[in-house]
């Protein structure tokens, strides 16, 4: 490999020296906010074939990609030319094992050198998900309409079922359609923002969101009317859908509902228009169809030009991650009718194959948190339905979607009253994502997800066309998650969820921990190495503040600031706010039925203010949480340990701080360092807007002196309301280690040994061992019940 690189380097130097031009690949490493070369060097890929992605090359007319089983490419097992985009998913399976890949590009008649050679492996159990060649894929789209969610040849059976086993659902759809007829949708074009309006103000927000709901009422209702008519509903349903469609077609495509002017109105306009068009197609005159095509050519082109090619290499814009599959719906509905529609669709399926999902890796998490997971994955399931019916592609063959439903199960076991990290999760309950999980269970045939849905008494149903189509899917048998580990790491997003009971939040003590390679960007802005504590499914130690308006003073300068999280600030300063490069990493995760352990490193999030911030959390289930923090800085500073609650904390000194919610409480014992300065306030700095009525309490613990290094050893002792805590923690510090005795229920105790020095030894059952962490659980007679020693890595 090294010899190949040397020869290539000599060639690149020699050709210009001889007077010849040479076209060089830009192989510069990716930066924060970029998708990066995929598969990355030495990556283990869980899908076969992998989706290839590379840095877009200036003025490239086409690309060629090759893959080989050997680094010298003596034999090329796969090759593709004529690639227009900077991504490619082959139409054939790659065998398990070691592979190498490279690419090059053409400008006019000149080809570049080959890129560097990148090694990767295909996992033995990789999911098979080849992307059909473009011509084959497009040929799968039916000639006739409807094309979205249903094919023309499926209508006869669906109409039969609408009068049979699915009649209750169809009757609900008819009732909904009757209501829409009784109160016809308004179709006057909505207003623009007034001149001089302040972006983000409550007035601006009223127009921004108001135009979205206006579009949904008009065109969303039209789609429902049209589909109900297709299933055998009254002729008036179809004609009313036609009226709404054609009156909305008169709106300025780049006006108040234009995608670039207001994407929250423009996106639903586009996909609801496309659905209504394909559902009511046979009722339209040729002149009306032509008008619809004219409108959507403008709107679709505007959307495509915003997304392509940027989204293939820099895909971390939040709204773009739903816009691309809405564009795909336009591509399906208007294929063969708008010349560019084929390109829109081909772009969308390549995003799915190569650059999605962006807020996770294959493990099923979501960087932006449960509320945005629910919002974005819910809308993605529409595209999953469309791909299945129109293109024959099963989204659940993708590794991420094979695990997607485990995220809500671990973040919010049934009965949990808040969604944890991320924007808009304060009042987001487990019930709020149960309907989506029911859909995911039906689409994937996953029994655990079906159990989650049934635990919330949620079925795959609904009063609209999507619910009707999904109700036609086979029933899934439920299976309790009691046989799964109670805790789980979603490594790709740097989130760990430590639970005692996955089946019932009322019995659950839960810790959320974050230290993420995604940084603090977008709606996943919570600080690295921050944690949350839930008792009985209710927040106890919380991420504080409430979004009054996106990007407001409170949102930016409180909620995006580390001071709003259960974390550590440095001289009052925050980690990098809402940035891709303010990263953390979960470096260790271990789970057993009685003990969990997770370690995060977050120094990289502080812009050089500190050299180290290692946070270790040991969960002695369900009664004690030991938090051990190690911090180092290049100059003396104040390290401020922060904690937030909904109710005022009672402070009886640093070793006895009490917090409570309606389900229970927690005692906090700051064991080290001594002489902490403890303060509490109920003030936000800055506060939310006046219309937000919110009171929360914020505790800060600061060492008496500034320093270049410090450690904190803190014990949290959560409990349910009916339980009482007995005794105090015993604590002993040596030069580089700590020994703790934590009282447990029924006279038991936990002996905990923490050491940063591998030379230190601890006795476990009479035998000595060296370990960073060791814990022994004792019964009331001080006999050993359980022991756990952190094993060396590797």
Image (cartoon, helix red, strand yellow):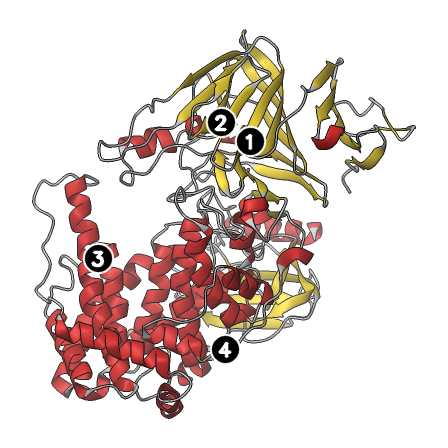
Q: CA distance from mark 3 to mark 1?
A: 39 Å
State which mark lies toward you, 2 or 4.
2
**Mark 3 Cα-neighbour bin, 10 Å: few <14, some 14–19, many ≥20:** many
Residue 606 image label: 2
Per the model, the C-alpha gap separating discs 1 and 2 is 8 Å
Earlier-in-chain disc, 1 versus 4? 4
Residue 212, numbered circle: 3
Q: Residues within 10 Å of mark 4 (few under 14, many from 20)?
A: some
Q: At numbered mark 4, what does the secondary structure look like: helix, strand or loop?
A: loop
When the figure is inspected, residue 165 is found, relative to residue 325, above or below; the finding is: below
Question: Residue at position x 43%, y 82% from top?
Answer: 135
The image shows residue 482 at horizontal and vertical percentages of: 66, 56
400 versus 567 height, above or below: below
The residue where tag 4 is placed is 132
Element class at badge 3 = helix
Crowd tier of the residue under label 2, counting other residues whose Cα lies within 10 Å: few below 14, some 14–19, many 20 or above: many
Report the Cα–Cα distance between label 1 and label 4: 42 Å
Label 1 crowd (10 A; few <14 / some 14-19 / many >=20): many
Residue in the foreground of this view, choosing between 382 and 286: 382
Residue 394: image location, x then y, percent: 51, 74
Q: CA distance from mark 3 to mark 2?
A: 38 Å
Q: Secondary structure at mark 1?
A: loop
What residue sits right under mark 1 in the picture? 602
Label 2 to label 4: alpha-carbon separation: 45 Å
Res. 580 image quadrant: top left
Viewer-nearest of labels 3 and 1?
A: 3
């Amino acid at each position: 490999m090294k010899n190949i690189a040397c020869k290539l380097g000599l060639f690149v130097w020699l050709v210009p020296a001889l007077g010849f031009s040479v076209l060089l690949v830009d192989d510069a490493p990716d930066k924060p906010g970029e998708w990066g070369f995929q598969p990355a060097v030495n990556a283990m890929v869980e899908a076969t074939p992998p989706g290839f992605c590379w840095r877009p090359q200036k003025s490239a007319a086409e690309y060629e990609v090759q893959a080989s089983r050997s680094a010298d490419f003596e034999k090329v097992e796969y090759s593709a030319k004529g690639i227009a985009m900077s991504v490619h998913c082959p139409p054939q399976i790659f065998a398990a094992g070691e592979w190498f890949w490279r690419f090059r590009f053409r400008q006019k008649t000149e080809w570049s050198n080959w890129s560097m050679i990148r090694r990767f492996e295909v996992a033995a159990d990789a999911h098979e998900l080849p992307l059909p060649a473009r011509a084959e894929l497009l040929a799968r789209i039916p000639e006739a309409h409807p094309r979205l969610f249903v094919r023309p040849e499926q209508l006869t059976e669906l109409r039969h079922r609408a009068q049979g086993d699915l009649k209750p659902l169809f009757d609900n759809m008819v009732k909904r359609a009757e209501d829409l007829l009784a109160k016809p949708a308004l179709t006057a074009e909505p207003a623009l923002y007034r001149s001089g309006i302040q972006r983000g103000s409550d007035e601006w927000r009223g127009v921004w969101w108001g135009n979205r709901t206006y579009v949904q009422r008009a065109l969303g209702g039209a789609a429902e009317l049209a589909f109900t008519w297709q299933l055998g509903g009254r002729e008036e349903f179809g004609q009313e859908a036609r009226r709404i469609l054609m009156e909305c077609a008169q709106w300025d495509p780049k006006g108040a509902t234009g995608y670039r002017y207001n994407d929250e109105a423009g996106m639903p306009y586009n996909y609801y228009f496309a659905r209504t068009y394909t559902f009511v197609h046979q009722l339209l005159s040729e002149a009306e169809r032509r008008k619809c095509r004219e409108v959507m050519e403008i709107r679709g082109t505007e959307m495509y030009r915003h997304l392509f090619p940027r989204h293939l290499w820099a895909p971390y814009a939040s709204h773009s991650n739903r816009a691309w599959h809405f564009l795909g719906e336009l591509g399906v509905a208007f294929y063969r009718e708008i010349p560019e529609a084929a390109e829109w669709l081909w772009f969308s399926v390549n995003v799915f194959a190569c650059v999605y999902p962006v807020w996770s890796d294959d493990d099923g998490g979501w960087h932006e948190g449960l509320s945005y997971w629910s919002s974005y994955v819910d809308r993605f399931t529409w595209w999953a339905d469309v791909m299945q019916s129109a293109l024959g592609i099963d989204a659940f063959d993708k590794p991420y979607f094979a695990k997607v439903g485990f995220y809500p199960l671990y973040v919010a076991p049934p009965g949990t009253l808040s969604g944890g990290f991320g924007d808009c999760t304060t009042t987001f309950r487990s019930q709020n994502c149960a309907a989506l999980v029911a859909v995911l269970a039906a689409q994937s045939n996953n029994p655990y997800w079906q159990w989650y849905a049934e635990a919330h008494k949620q079925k795959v149903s609904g009063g609209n066309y999507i619910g009707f189509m999904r109700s036609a899917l086979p029933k899934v048998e439920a299976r309790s998650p009691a046989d799964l580990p109670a805790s789980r790491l979603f490594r790709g997003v740097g989130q760990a969820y430590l639970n005692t009971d996955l089946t019932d939040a009322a019995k659950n003590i839960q810790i959320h921990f974050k230290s993420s390679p995604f940084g603090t960007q977008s709606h996943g802005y919570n600080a690295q190495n921050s944690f949350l504590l839930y008792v009985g499914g209710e927040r106890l130690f919380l991420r504080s503040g409430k979004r009054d308006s996106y990007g407001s003073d409170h949102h930016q300068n409180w909620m995006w600031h580390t001071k709003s999280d259960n974390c550590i600030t440095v001289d009052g300063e925050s980690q990098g706010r809402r940035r891709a490069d303010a990263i953390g990493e979960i470096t260790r995760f271990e789970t057993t039925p009685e003990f969990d352990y997770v370690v995060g490193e977050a120094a990289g999030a502080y812009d050089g203010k500190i050299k180290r911030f290692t946070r270790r959390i040991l969960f002695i289930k369900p009664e004690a949480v030991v938090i051990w923090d190690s911090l180092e800085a290049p100059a003396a500073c104040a390290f401020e340990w922060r904690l937030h609650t909904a109710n005022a904390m009672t402070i009886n000194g640093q070793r006895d701080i009490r917090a409570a919610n309606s389900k229970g409480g927690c005692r906090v014992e700051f064991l080290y360092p001594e002489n902490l300065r403890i303060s509490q306030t109920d003030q936000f700095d800055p506060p939310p807007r006046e219309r937000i009525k919110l009171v929360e309490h914020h505790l800060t613990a600061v060492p008496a002196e500034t320093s270049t290094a410090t450690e904190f050893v803190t014990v949290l002792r959560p409990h349910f309301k009916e339980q009482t805590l007995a005794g105090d923690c015993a604590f002993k510090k040596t030069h580089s280690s700590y020994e703790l005795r934590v009282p447990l229920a029924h006279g038991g105790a936990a002996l905990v040994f923490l050491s940063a020095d591998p030379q230190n030894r601890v006795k476990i059952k009479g035998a000595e061992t060296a370990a960073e962490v060791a814990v022994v659980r004792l019964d009331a007679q001080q006999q050993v019940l359980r022991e756990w020693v952190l094993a060396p890595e590797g």
